[in-house]
Amino acid sequence: MSSPAPYRLRLGEVVVELLCPDPDTAAALARYFDRPSDPAAPTVSLRLHMVEHDHQPTVPSSLILGKRLVPGGFDLAQGLVSGTYDPATGRGDLHVLDILSRGRMTRIFEQILYQAFHAACRRTGWDAALVHSSAVVRDGRGFLFVGPSDAGKSTIADLSGDALVLNDEMNLVEFRPGGPWLLASPFNGHYRHKRPGEAPLAAILLPHKGPRHRLEPVGPGEAAAHVAAQVAPPVPLDELADASTLTAMLDTATRLVQAVPVRRMVFLPDAGFWPEVLRAFPLEQRGR
């Protein structure tokens, strides 16, 4: 049996290693995420086994909701992904049906890495979260556009090409002593315009398509509920989502909306929303 080929993906302060079955798989991951393998020691290391199959499996939109703990490990979506993980050592195995390596299906595969990220944070105590969002840095300030699918996150990223676009779909937020920071994530490898970077979080915008550009106030309860719905469930590989997961998501959202201003951003599909945003949050503004 040949030795596995490692691919190490840095996610802020943690590194998730996939021990691939061959160098071609490792190289394909590097191309997909548009990042070379990180030289740092891994926080979590998972041996990856790609499983060929002759049936058409059901691929759900979420690999959290269909997750089960089974003797010795876990199962996601009735065998779509199965594996083991030892939180004491940070090591495990993943058996993944190879349909998740094809085309847009790789977006589903990324959800396994979300769980590996949360396992790594659990091991290190790193205070960070993943948020479904578009993130843009302007003038050294981070703006987080948070909303469900079709709210306009990718449109906002596409209209912000003159700034630093961290990601159009999933971003890292780190809670630092001076306040939250935005960090680029490599997720959504199909989006090729994202760039590495980080910045202090200046504001959270809740995008809504409308007839003209304007910013509207949002109450703290409503803001926290909107943001909580887009926080990636902080479920590591060896656990299931439960009532405490929802509490943790709301806690993360509450910390964010207490730290920075939140506005509803009604916008047209053009870059005219940026002058409104920059007027509302001038460079010298701090906090709320």
Image (tube, helix red, strand yellow):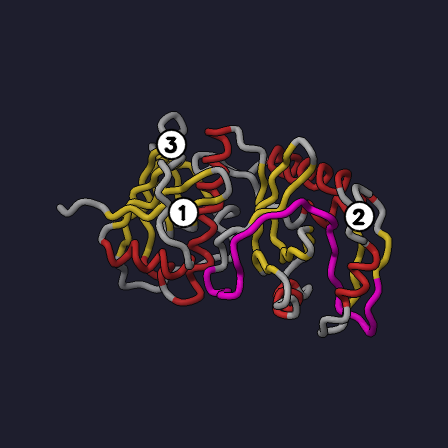
Measured Cα–Cα span from mark 1 to mark 3: 15 Å
Q: Which residue is mark 3?
A: 90
- The amino acid on which the numbered mark 3 sits, given as a three-letter code, is Gly
Q: Is residue 212 magenta?
A: yes
Q: Which residue is mark 2?
A: 284
Residue 154's spot in the image, x, y percent?
61, 65
| Highlighted range, magenta | 189-214
Q: Is residue 203 left or right of residue 51?
A: right
Query: In the rendered structure, which disc, 3 or 2, sits on the residue that comes first in sequence?
Result: 3
Q: Which residue is mark 1?
A: 9
In this rendering, the answer to whether 177 lies above or below 136 is above
- The amino acid on which the numbered mark 2 sits, given as a three-letter code, is Glu
Determine if residue 31 is in view: yes
SS for callout 3: loop
Determine if residue 150 is in view: no
Q: Which one is in front in this view, the residue at disc 3 or the one at disc 2?
A: 2
* Residue at the (80%, 57%) spot, across then down: 264
Residue 188's spot in the image, x, y percent?
49, 59
Residue 139's spot in the image, x, y percent?
69, 55
| Quadrant of the drawing holding the C terminus | top right
* Residue at the (37%, 65%) spot, across then down: 102
Q: Which one is in front in this view, the residue at disc 1 or the one at disc 2?
A: 2
